[in-house]
Image (cartoon, rainbow, N blue to C red):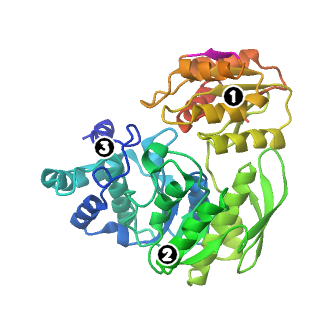
């Protein structure tokens, strides 16, 4: 088996990242994961675990916490999804991606166990994400990680990652996303996310846009006798200013005060940093060697591309993976707050299961020109649908086949003081980053 054959094998199963399924046990049954991991001698129980769910920000918080744990001297695994450029980005240890050779080796090791589980199919057949998750746990076990920071794939309650026993659970901001799977109300979505809260655990939550969401968390914590730490009240933060590549903040935690600098822009990243600090303090309280200095160092060097990332200064090119109305609103606010520009040109491509009308309504007021595109992902929305939605707002959008056409077109339209923003999905953002490199654009 070579690298491509290993990837082909992983993607040969049902892939809910590409085809959504309703939230029920027929599609998501954790007993499949328990059976597979049992055959592998339960690698997921070898390391201390941080488990992170949420609609937005969970990847950023995961990256921040992993960076601090590494800076604290712990060998740290990080499992996230989706990837920007290569599958290997999903599984890394102390910032180093799993190698192609290692990926092949672990797929070959897992293959007979996967096929044994699927042959019996006692609880249904394993999915692509379940195989990815088991692979990550097995890899982290071999690498001897002290901590594994695990980002939920979708939801929480029935997610393949929800077989861990975490030292701390984290739930970031909840908003409308994946409604066809998680439910049509914030209460339903929050209940799915709250499924990661274990009995007698400690839970850190980010500020929420709706009090009903907090009531769901409160009830979940009461019923499971879990300790609840709320960012925004128990832990607070204050912006200390920013430049075009970094921002500073002060976090008032439960154990102390921290003056921090992070290489990520946007008010939401201040919230994410405060959430990471709150969860890291939980680990410090449990006796893990996490100091103020390691928190400062780890957050200062965190890397999480594709989120309000500046690709070029002249013209200004910013990419961001905003994919729902709330994140689109925050993107618009961040562009206005953090950057100085004359006109704004939008390149947008959206996945077919997203709230296109909501995203467009948030972005329309800022942009003078719009270029619709799409990624190579099977769930990419046709550009005609994107063009039609902007037309309903009285904005004429131009359709292009892919980002390799859209970005040069935007560059031809842009003046020296104009902004080009690429957004709508991480898949489109990944294409823009690759295209910018090919064109020799750099910050």
The quadrant of the image that shows the C terminus is top right
Q: Is residue 399 magenta?
A: yes
Residue for point 56% across, 59% down: 62
Residue for point 46% across, 59% down: 192
Q: Secondary structure at mark 2?
A: loop
**Image spot of residue 378 (x, y percent):** 41, 30
Q: Is residue 224 magenta?
A: no
The magenta segment: 396-400
Query: Label 1, on which residue?
Result: 441
Taking 144 as reference, is 91 above or below it?
above
Q: Secondary structure at mark 3?
A: helix
Q: Would you say the residues marked 3 and 1 are in contact, meaning their CB atoms lie under 8 Å apart?
A: no
Q: Nearer the viewer, residue 224 or 92?
A: 224
Query: Label 3, on which residue?
Result: 10
Report the number of numbered marks. 3
Q: CA distance from mark 2 to mark 3?
A: 29 Å
């Amino acid at each position: 088996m070579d690298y491509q054959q290993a990837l082909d094998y992983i993607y040969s199963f049902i892939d809910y990242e590409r085809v959504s399924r309703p939230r029920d046990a027929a599609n998501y049954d954790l007993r499949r994961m328990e059976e597979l991991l049992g055959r592998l001698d339960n690698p997921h129980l070898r390391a201390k675990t941080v488990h992170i769910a949420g609609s937005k920000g969970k990847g950023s918080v995961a990256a921040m916490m992993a960076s601090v744990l590494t800076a604290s001297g712990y060998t740290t695994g990080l499992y996230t999804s989706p990837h920007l450029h290569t599958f290997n980005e999903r599984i890394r240890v102390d910032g180093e991606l799993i190698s192609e050779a290692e990926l092949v080796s672990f797929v070959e090791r897992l293959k007979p166990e996967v096929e044994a589980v699927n042959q019996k199919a006692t609880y249904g057949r394993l999915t692509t994400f379940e195989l990815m998750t088991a692979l990550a746990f097995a890899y982290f076990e071999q690498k001897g990680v002290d901590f594994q920071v695990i980002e939920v794939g979708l939801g929480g309650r029935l997610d393949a990652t929800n077989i861990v026993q975490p030292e701390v659970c984290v739930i970031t901001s909840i908003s409308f996303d994946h409604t066809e799977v998680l439910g049509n109300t914030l209460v339903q979505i929050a209940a799915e996310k709250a499924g990661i809260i274990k009995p007698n655990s400690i839970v850190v939550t980010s500020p929420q846009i709706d009090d009903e969401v907090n009531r769901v968390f409160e009830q979940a914590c009461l019923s499971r006798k879990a300790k609840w730490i709320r960012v925004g009240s128990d832990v607070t933060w204050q912006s200390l200013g920013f430049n075009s590549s970094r921002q500073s903040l002060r976090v008032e935690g439960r154990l102390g005060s921290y003056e921090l600098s992070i290489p990520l822009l946007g008010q939401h990243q201040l919230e994410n940093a405060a959430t990471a600090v709150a969860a890291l303090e939980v680990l410090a309280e449990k006796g893990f060697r996490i100091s103020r200095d390691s928190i400062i160092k780890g957050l200062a060097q965190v890397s999480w591309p594709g989120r309000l990332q500046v690709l070029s200064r002249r013209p200004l090119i910013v990419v961001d993976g905003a994919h729902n109305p709330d994140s689109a609103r925050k993107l618009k606010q961040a562009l206005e707050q953090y950057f100085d520009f004359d006109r704004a040109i939008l390149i947008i491509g959206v996945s077919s299961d997203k709230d296109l009308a909501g995203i467009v309504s948030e972005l329309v007021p800022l942009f003078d020109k719009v270029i619709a595109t799409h990624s190579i992902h099977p769930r990419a929305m046709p550009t005609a649908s994107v063009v039609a939605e902007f037309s309903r707002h009285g904005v004429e959008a131009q359709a292009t086949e892919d980002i390799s056409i859209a970005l040069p077109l935007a560059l031809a339209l842009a003046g020296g003081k104009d902004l080009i923003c690429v957004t709508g999905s991480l898949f489109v953002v990944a294409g823009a980053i690759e295209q910018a490199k090919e064109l020799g654009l750099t910050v």
